[in-house]
Image (cartoon, rainbow, N blue to C red):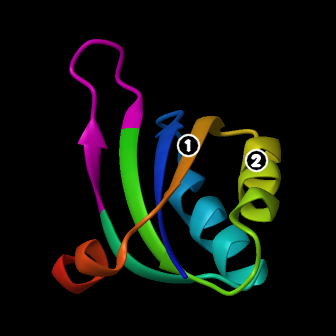
Amino acid sequence: MRYRLDLVLKPVEGALVRVLGMTERRGFAPRHISGGADAGDGRWRLQLVVDGSRPAETLKRQLQKVYDCESVEIAPLETGAQEAA
């Protein structure tokens, strides 16, 4: 199954590496990453598309424990959207 994660991260060294590492250790394969810094507060807004056969809620709970991660939203991508991503 393919999922899109919408994350807000603190702009600190290693934050992205911690998120990607946690994602892979939980059995999800990153397929697409996009994002940037918010001009208003400096937080990083990140969209991450992943593939995995495990429940997405498992990944969400683990990412919420990462200190640098302020919020996580996960949405399943439909078959048509998978082709575009």
Question: Which residue position is annotated with label 1?
Answer: 73
* First in sequence: mark 1 vs mark 2: 2
| Residue 48 position within the rendered picture, expressed as x and y whole percent measured from the top left | 42, 63
| Residue 2 position within the rendered picture, expressed as x and y whole percent measured from the top left | 48, 77
Report the residue at 26% width, 72% height from top: 81
The extreme front residue here reads 79
> With respect to residue 74, does 51 lie above or below?
below
67 inside magenta stretch: no
Report the residue at 37% width, 71% height from top: 78
- Relative horizontal placement of residue 11, taking residue 74 as reference (left or right): left
Q: Amino acid at mark 1?
A: Glu
| Residue 63 position within the rendered picture, expressed as x and y whole percent measured from the top left | 72, 52
Q: Spatial distance from mark 1 to mark 2, Cα to Cα?
A: 14 Å
- Relative horizontal placement of residue 57, taking residue 77 as reference (left or right): right
Quarter that holds the N terminus: bottom right
Question: Which residue position is annotated with label 2?
Answer: 66
